Image (spheres, rainbow, N blue to C red):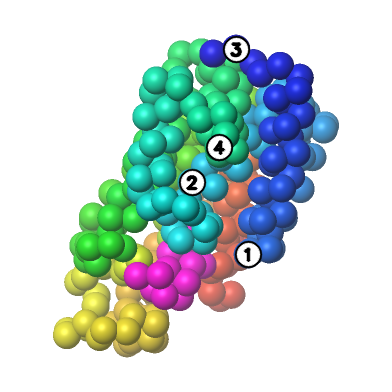
Amino acid sequence: MNIPPWRERLFLEIECLRQFLLFGRRHRRYLTIALGVFLFSLFSSWRLGRVQRWGFCALQWVDDLLDGDRASTEDPVTAVNRLMSAMRSGDFDDQDRLHRLMRGYLAVLDWASPDGEGKTATFAVIEAMLFDRKRVIEQIQMSDQELKQQHLRTFEPSVNLLLLGSGATTRVKDCPEIVDIFGWCSTVRDLEEDLAKGLLNLPREFLPVPLPDRWSGLASDPTVTLWLDREAQRAERNIRSALEKINRMKDARGRSVLRLYVRSMSRYLPKKTAPH
């Protein structure tokens, strides 16, 4: 897949700015991500930065569709499956801005990852998002181990795409604790929001019986609180272990990226356990 011509590249850059503004209206953290992405592009590599800019916006757009945070004229699952069919065939809808953004992203991804690693990871991330949508629709309850497997399916390819788009040679396999840290952080950070949407990221072993019809108060249930405390302690151990591994990495770019994200996520630890 060839790099898009300059007119299409200009369209995609403007579209990314538009998407970052839409993301930022919902959560200010997306504005911080946008700042980091554009600073990397300006001071490191504008061309490589396209993988980050276009990829983040395309995949976050898909996530927003499936989460119900983005209006859609068709069923979100149908829309995402149609997009994935286009990704496989190369037959994108030129009237659909998301299709154009994804097509541009796959083109620069082919340039940055000619071995196909990036494309495989992209499909894996979207498949994990689709399963989360299925969990909401079918009100699926998962065990502690099943939730950790879902975190692995979600964050291993996601973090590898982040590293690839940064030009790093490091991958998740070099610091496997990173998956647990991302999974823990996304759970505690978005717990109330996820529960309100019907996404249950609490293990069934720690849920009250019977499970109430309204999930919004589950975070304060004593059994759930016990699990959250246990997970915070495990996250603290994982963060310390990950930082030790990251500090020993020879890949400077991978070291910088992972350290930045791990330290950012450590802010969600209880103050008494947060590493300094």
Residue 91 place in picture, x, y as percent:
45, 22
Q: Are marks 3 and 1 in contact (CB under 8 Å)?
A: no
Mark 3 secondary-structure assignment: loop
Which one is in front, 160 or 62? 62
Residue 116 place in picture, x, y as percent:
44, 18
Q: CA distance from mark 1 to mark 2?
A: 15 Å
Q: Specify the amino acid type for callout 4.
A: Asp
Q: Of the residues under marks 3 and 1, which one precedes in the sequence? A: 3
Q: Of the residues under marks 4 and 3, which one precedes in the sequence? A: 3
Q: Of the residues under marks 1 and 2, which one precedes in the sequence? A: 1
Which one is in front, 187 or 83? 83
Mark 2 secondary-structure assignment: helix
Task: Identify the residue position indicated by label 2 in the image.
Answer: 62
Residue 2, numbered circle = 3
Q: CA distance from mark 2 to mark 4?
A: 13 Å
Q: Specify the amino acid type for callout 3.
A: Asn
Q: CA distance from mark 4 to mark 1?
A: 23 Å
Span highlighted in magenta in the image: 185-198
Whether residue 89 is visible: yes
Instruction: Identify the residue at image location x=64%, y=16%.
Output: 3
Task: Identify the residue position indicated by label 1 in the image.
Answer: 26
Which one is in front, 20 or 114? 20
Q: Are marks 1 and 2 in contact (CB under 8 Å)?
A: no
Q: Of the residues under marks 4 and 1, which one precedes in the sequence? A: 1
Task: Identify the residue position indicated by label 4 in the image.
Answer: 96
The quarter of the displayed image where residue 89 is located? top left
| Side of 3 relative to 140 (left or right) | right
Residue 67 place in picture, x, y as percent:
44, 59
| Side of 203 relative to 183 (left or right) | left
Between marks 4 and 3 in the image, the one whose residue lies nearer the viewer: 4
